[in-house]
Amino acid sequence: MQDFMDALLFSFKELLRQNTTKYAMGSGFVVTLVWILIGYALWPSLVGFTSSILSMLPFSMIQSNGAWMLSSFIWLQAVLITFALIFAFLGNLISQKVQNHHYSAFALIIALGSALFWGVVWMSEGDVIYEQALKLFTWLPFETIEKALSYLIAFYILYTGVIITLIFVTSMLSSSYFNTIKEEHFPYDTFYDEAESKTVVKTIKDTAIFLGLSIVTLPLLFIPILNFIILVVLWVWLMKDTLAYDTSNYVFGKDAEQKRQEYKIATWGFAILGSLFNFIPVFNVFGPYFTELALLYYYKEKRDLSQE
């Protein structure tokens, strides 16, 4: 358990460093821009597709699902508005007190704090918020609800595309990024990056499986609660299977598969925590790097302990 907590601490510290911020924000900006352009080009088709599915569902299910999605959307807006207000009123003071290379780290802490605060509010008052959203949907005509929900689900599809691509890109950059971490923290340790071609094949395979499962389970995304569970499970699986493969090969070499099985509980734990970043747009770009950093430290500590 101590190694698990040490790995989390190492990962959080590295997230706040300029080098990790450069990798995460750089790849995140490019990936998000690409998906914004895709969304702009395909938006009418996406909305039409989601509307056609919604038209086949019972009105009561659409109301319930719409209320749940509206509640989640309000939480997200509360997080983003809180973050924006803090910087709007305290931005100048923060820039004067915080050094430039720590500015992005401070921004990440504020974002996570905002998400945690509103998460506690939603945990305690979530039922009330959901009931009020459901009451709103009972007052609106079916066409209005259907259109609003179509827009939200189309946005979800695009956002999922961003997350998949971010994990894919992080995996592709893992060897270069790991070598940077090695030079800074573990210059005298032995690591393996000969299997880079295998990790590329594995990443492509996992991405294809994720896309296939997403298509198969798409109808279930219109069922409240179940859609949330499916969403998280798919995100966690992709992050765990792809990034753990990259990291274990880098740390253990030819013994990677055996070691992944040996430490699978901790691996799942890191993937679950990393997936939580996906619920905060902009800061979701740090999720894959958080997971890789935690896995790298954890696997390395376990390897060093077994060699003593």
Image (spheres, rainbow, N blue to C red):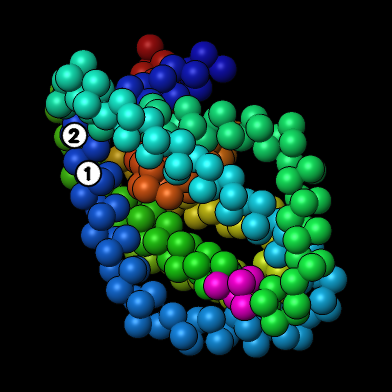
Circle 1 is placed at which residue position? 23
Residue 78 percent coordinates (x, y) = 53, 42
Quadrant the N terminus occupies: top right
Residue 80 forms part of the magenta stretch: no
Check the image and report above or below for 223 versus 111.
below
The kind of residue tagged 1 is Tyr
Residue at 62%, 78% in the rendered image: 147
Pick whichever, 49 or 73, lies toward us.
Answer: 73
Q: Are marks 1 and 2 in contact (CB under 8 Å)?
A: yes
Query: How would you rate the neighbour count of disc 2 (Cα within 10 Å): few for under 14, some for 14-19, many for 20 or more?
Result: some
Residue 233 percent coordinates (x, y) = 62, 52
- Secondary structure, mark 1, is helix
Residue at 39%, 75% in the rendered image: 39
Residue 299 percent coordinates (x, y) = 41, 29
Image quadrant assignment for residue 176? top left
The kind of residue tagged 2 is Asn
What span is in magenta?
A: 147-151
Check the image and report above or below for 9 versus 132.
above
Image quadrant assignment for residue 29? bottom left
Residue 127 percent coordinates (x, y) = 79, 43
Circle 2 is placed at which residue position? 19
Check the image and report above or below for 143 versus 276.
below
Helix, strand or loop: magenta stretch: helix
Residue at 66%, 32% in the rendered image: 121
